[in-house]
Amino acid sequence: MERLDTTTRRKYEIKARVFRALGHPTRLFIVEQLAGGERCVCEFNAAIDADFSTISKHLSVLKNAGLVEDEKRGSNVFYRLRIPADGRLFSCMDEAAGALAAAFGATHE
Amino acid sequence: MERLDTTTRRKYEIKARVFRALGHPTRLFIVEQLAGGERCVCEFNAAIDADFSTISKHLSVLKNAGLVEDEKRGSNVFYRLRIPADGRLFSCMDEAAGALAAAFGATHE
DNA sequence: TGGCACTTTGGTTAAATTGCCAAATAGGGG
DNA sequence: CCCCTATTTGGCAATTTAACCAAAGTGCCA
């Protein structure tokens, strides 16, 4: 088997950050909304029952992972996905997570 | 925009657990190895420079997320992916993570 | 310019994660 | 049956993450 050396590990660390960014229900929701197009922070504030600062920090995590980018227009800030817009990626991830979730539910609940 | 209510959140929580399980370099490495077929824990012990117990716990995280299953044969334990074996899922995730990693690398390092 | 509305940042606290060591458990072979 | 190997579990300390509140920007508009 291949060995997990320092170089290989560094490569995985970047990918891992992406997955970790997706590893929170609120952020998963945000990403799914963004898959439908650009959104204003204020929309998330209205849709998510949490403090504004909490939501802002979730967006920041997604940004640091390279998943989203933001743009200020007027007094609002808009976020959008930073990945190819063909939707394939996320439908795939969603399908994957769904399948795994089903598998999980079948044995552990 | 859709609202993130309790029911929706529960759905996302299960998916999030899957992503979080993938959100660690060592576990990402393990999963990628398993994509090539079943592996014995002892192989991971040889390939990864960490305590046996640490590796065992990483495998446990993957199992709790529903990503892998284990089988004891003789004195060894073998792990395998618990997802459709067509490899599409992981090649897709890998591609996604790779693209995102590239995007990330370009701006944040 | 003064004051809102929108968003982020800083501080704090609680909870979850990670990794090592030591100890327990389980199978196989003498 | 005892020991040895393979793996998991329990206990801890260090680090990271998540959530809230309060406070600090930033741009609009009266």
Image (cartoon, coloured by chain):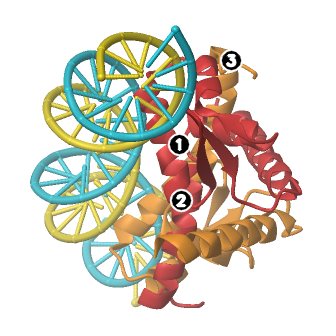
Chain colours: A red, B orange, C yellow, D cyan
Question: In the rendered image, which quarter contains the N terminus of chain B?
Answer: top right
Evaluate whether residue A108 shows in this view. Answer: no
Element carrying mark 1: helix
Inspect the image, locate mark 3, and give the three-letter code of the amino acid beneath it: Thr
- Looking at the image, residue B42 lies above or below residue B85: below
Measuring from the top left, give residue B32's x and y in whole percent.
66, 74
Q: Residues within 10 Å of mark 3 (few under 14, many from 20)?
A: few
The image position of residue A8, as x and y in percent, is: 51, 86
Q: Is residue D10 above or below residue B67?
A: above
For mark 2, name the chain: A
Q: Which residue type carries mark 2?
A: Ala
Camera-nearest residue between C27 and A39? A39
Local crowd size for mark 2, using a 10 Å CA cut-off: few (<14), some (14–19), many (≥20): many
Alpha carbon separation for disc pair 2 and 3: 27 Å
Task: Report whether A88 appears left or right of A37.
Answer: right
Task: First in sequence, mark 2 or 1: give its number.
Answer: 1
Say which element carries label 2: loop
- Residue A105 drawn at (x, y percent): 71, 34
Q: Quadrant of residue B7?
A: top right
Element assignment for label 3: helix
B4 or A6, nearer to the observer: B4
